[in-house]
């Protein structure tokens, strides 16, 4: 039931970044569930990770190792290796060590990523048995297959790609993501991998990724449940024949930033479009806040309200529920008489009450669409924030009531 | 689908407190939807009200008027008179003035309460036309009929009653409540009315109500959506032949406090048991917190998680979702290796990981019950908090997708 999400667009290969996919049969025999990514020597790598205190074993390891030299990213689906304690850490380290052995590199240069059921022991042997096939499969034009290989409850693979030209040299930014439930990334995201052939020093790359994630992955929510396994990685292979980017300024950096932002946004929104049971893609825009935080508080109060989400599913312009959510968002000294609310372009509430011009037919027309905008004008300042979310459907309950059985 | 909620218990009349019910046909012809309550002269009245910034017109008026002499409480269902701006305030004042005129009292002594759809104009004429019948119906033994008269999406009426004897005099505390959706009371509740024939000075009564609400109404959540119309009132008619309670101490006060707490708890939990689409009654207990607030943060993160709520609906002991919610609750420097989680009496997670003794069969046995306890031991201090909530079922989506249509 993905909303406005078609087949994958063309995903341009990134020189210096290869992907290999194999099947370890973790949840189902034959399913692609192991993805290995190889970064060319000299690549810089940045990562942002979940702030969930129960972060998974692979997240703990990847966070430590991203500080050093990174050559391989090893991802499995079907098992999150979260809530698994010390044995989970050992299991993650073990699979990395085996990959390092096969590739003839230092084991600290392999970063692990896992997604799937929480609390089950990682099937180390199955994963290790699949590594040779994944390594043999490594190639630069494998992005589309890898996008499928990292899926769990996703119904469609997610990817985006941009190219720009600088001083006659083409630079590529390509990314893929997965995720459909347990989605409220916090300073990170579900699994996302973005690579570019630009050459960027690590601190600049890290800041760039953080900025991009804060405007894309960190602004989406499906169910408000921050995952234990969120990670987003940005790899710069440096294979493009252009000078190294050493500072966050200049024309080349600006072009790269634009491309990274666009790819991040497209794959982040793809996660929402494929949200569990989603029948609507909803943009919640909060303008006129005194602070960014209060805009976010209002936006998330609206985006997480089960009453609003079920009304969206029913295409019911139940604007009273929107006002109620704004009112409970905890904004200090909120003057409701300054608040306007728009559904698409239709003003539904003016100065805190029903807009005099509003008719139910206008609201119903907007709600009938698959893509819906809710805009809240707080009238308190100049800050603004945008969040993307989904509705709450019968299918959502079905998926999550039946996920493990 | 109410969970563990039977027919109303015996609701003892409270001398000095009469209730009258009538039908104004606000949503459906013939439905009991107007309730008038009369407090004997000399009664003291306390109230707690929603902290939603978009509080409804009747809440604004009732908050002001509860400071003065209160003689009548006027409740309508089917229309919340919220998000209605200045005309809404005038409409609420108008119905109160009409009741005052009929009763021959000052209009400031009438407090209005409304519940139902947000954003529609209050049908003032229909309500006013029903007032004579409601007044004619006033009697002390009308609690059960009034409990039905204040229902909206509730499937069963809710009430509780306690009596105690002090110095040979019987004192009664009786209360009713309504609510099944848009339930996360914040320093107040959905509509709740409690009366006693004890004589209590207003400041003591107000503190008593606030304490009772903080342990009962303010600890329940169905969907996390704080209503615009929450109110809970406590009336002390002073008809019992006992000394006036002037301070929050002594044996009489202790007995009264106990009775008020028990009635509050019973009618608050009844709201959860009758939660929209509820098939489970869930007690979330968080112990060992360094502060009460962090216990509440963890408790609400669990109680509001759609992933946990759908797992509860499916009777699936998906404990990984519980750990994930605890981990994202925002507790500073949370050491997950100190956390134990229990489902009923079964330890499912020990020191942050799956408990070695845990088997899926043990968890499934607890989850198969209609009443489920989730206990989280944080191991950080001595604070503890308890919250009551429901599961998230297909029926919940159905009810809220179809509520207005």
Image (cartoon, coloured by chain):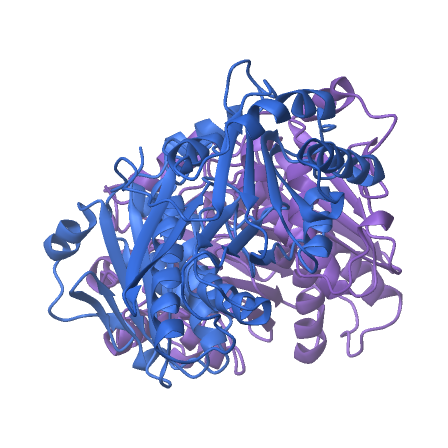
Chain colours: A blue, B purple
Horizontal and vertical percent position of residue A81 = 69, 35
- Residue A45 vs B106, above or below: the answer is above
A175 relative position to A183: left or right:
left
> Could you tell me which quadrant the C terminus of chain B lies in?
top left
Q: Which residue appears at 82% of the width and 25% of the height?
A: B358
Horizontal and vertical percent position of residue B41 = 55, 73
- Which quarter of the figure has residue A347? bottom left
Horizontal and vertical percent position of residue B114 = 38, 61
Q: Which residue appears at 47% of the width and 33% of the height?
A: A151
Answer yes or no: is residue B138 visible.
Answer: no
Total numbered labels placed on residues in the image: 0
Residue closest to the eye, A236 or B344: A236
B317 relative position to B249: left or right:
left
- Residue B19 vs B88, above or below: the answer is above
- Which quarter of the figure has residue B30? top left
Horizontal and vertical percent position of residue A333 = 47, 83
Residue closest to the eye, A170 or A188: A170
Query: Farthest residue toward the bottom?
Result: A381
């Amino acid at each position: 039931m993905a909303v406005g999400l078609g087949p994958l667009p063309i995903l341009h290969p990134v020189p210096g970044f290869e992907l290999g996919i194999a099947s370890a049969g973790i949840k189902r025999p034959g399913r692609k569930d192991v993805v290995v990514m190889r970064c060319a020597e000299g690549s810089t790598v940045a990562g942002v990770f979940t702030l969930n205190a129960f972060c998974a074993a692979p997240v703990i390891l990847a966070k430590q190792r991203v500080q050093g030299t990174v050559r391989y990213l090893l991802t499995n689906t079907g098992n999150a290796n979260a809530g698994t304690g010390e044995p989970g850490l050992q299991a993650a380290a073990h699979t990395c060590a085996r990959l390092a052995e096969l590739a003839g590199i230092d084991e600290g240069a392999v970063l692990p990523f896992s997604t799937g059921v929480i609390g089950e022991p990682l099937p180390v042997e199955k994963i290790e048995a699949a590594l040779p096939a994944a390594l043999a499969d490594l190639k630069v034009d494998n992005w589309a297959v890898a996008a499928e290989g990292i899926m769990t409850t996703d119904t469609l693979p997610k990817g985006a790609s941009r190219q720009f030209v600088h001083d006659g040299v083409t630079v590529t930014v390509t990314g893929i993501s997965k995720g459909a439930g347990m989605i409220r990334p916090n300073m990170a995201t579900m699994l996302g991998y973005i690579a570019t052939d630009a050459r960027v020093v690590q601190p600049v790359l890290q800041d760039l990724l953080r900025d991009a994630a804060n405007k894309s992955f960190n602004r989406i929510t499906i169910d408000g449940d921050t995952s234990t396994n969120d990670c987003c990685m940005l790899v710069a292979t440096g294979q493009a024949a252009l000078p190294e980017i050493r500072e966050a300024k200049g024309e080349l950096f600006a072009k790269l930033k634009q491309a990274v932002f666009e790819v991040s946004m497209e794959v982040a929104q793809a996660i929402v479009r494929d949200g569990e049971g989603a029948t609507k893609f909803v943009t919640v825009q909060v303008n006129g806040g005194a602070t960014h935080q209060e805009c976010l508080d209002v936006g998330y109060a609206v985006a997480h309200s089960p009453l609003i989400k079920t009304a969206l599913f029913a295409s019911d312009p139940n604007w009273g529920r929107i006002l109620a959510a704004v009112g409970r968002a905890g904004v200090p000294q909120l003057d409701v008489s300054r608040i306007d609310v728009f559904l698409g372009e239709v003003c539904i509430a003016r100065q805190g009450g029903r807009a005099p011009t509003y008719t139910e037919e206008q609201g119903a027309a907007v709600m009938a669409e698959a893509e819906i905008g809710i805009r809240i004008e707080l009238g308190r300042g100049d800050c603004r924030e945008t969040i993307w979310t989904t509705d709450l459907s019968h299918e959502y309950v079905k998926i999550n009531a039946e996920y493990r059985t």
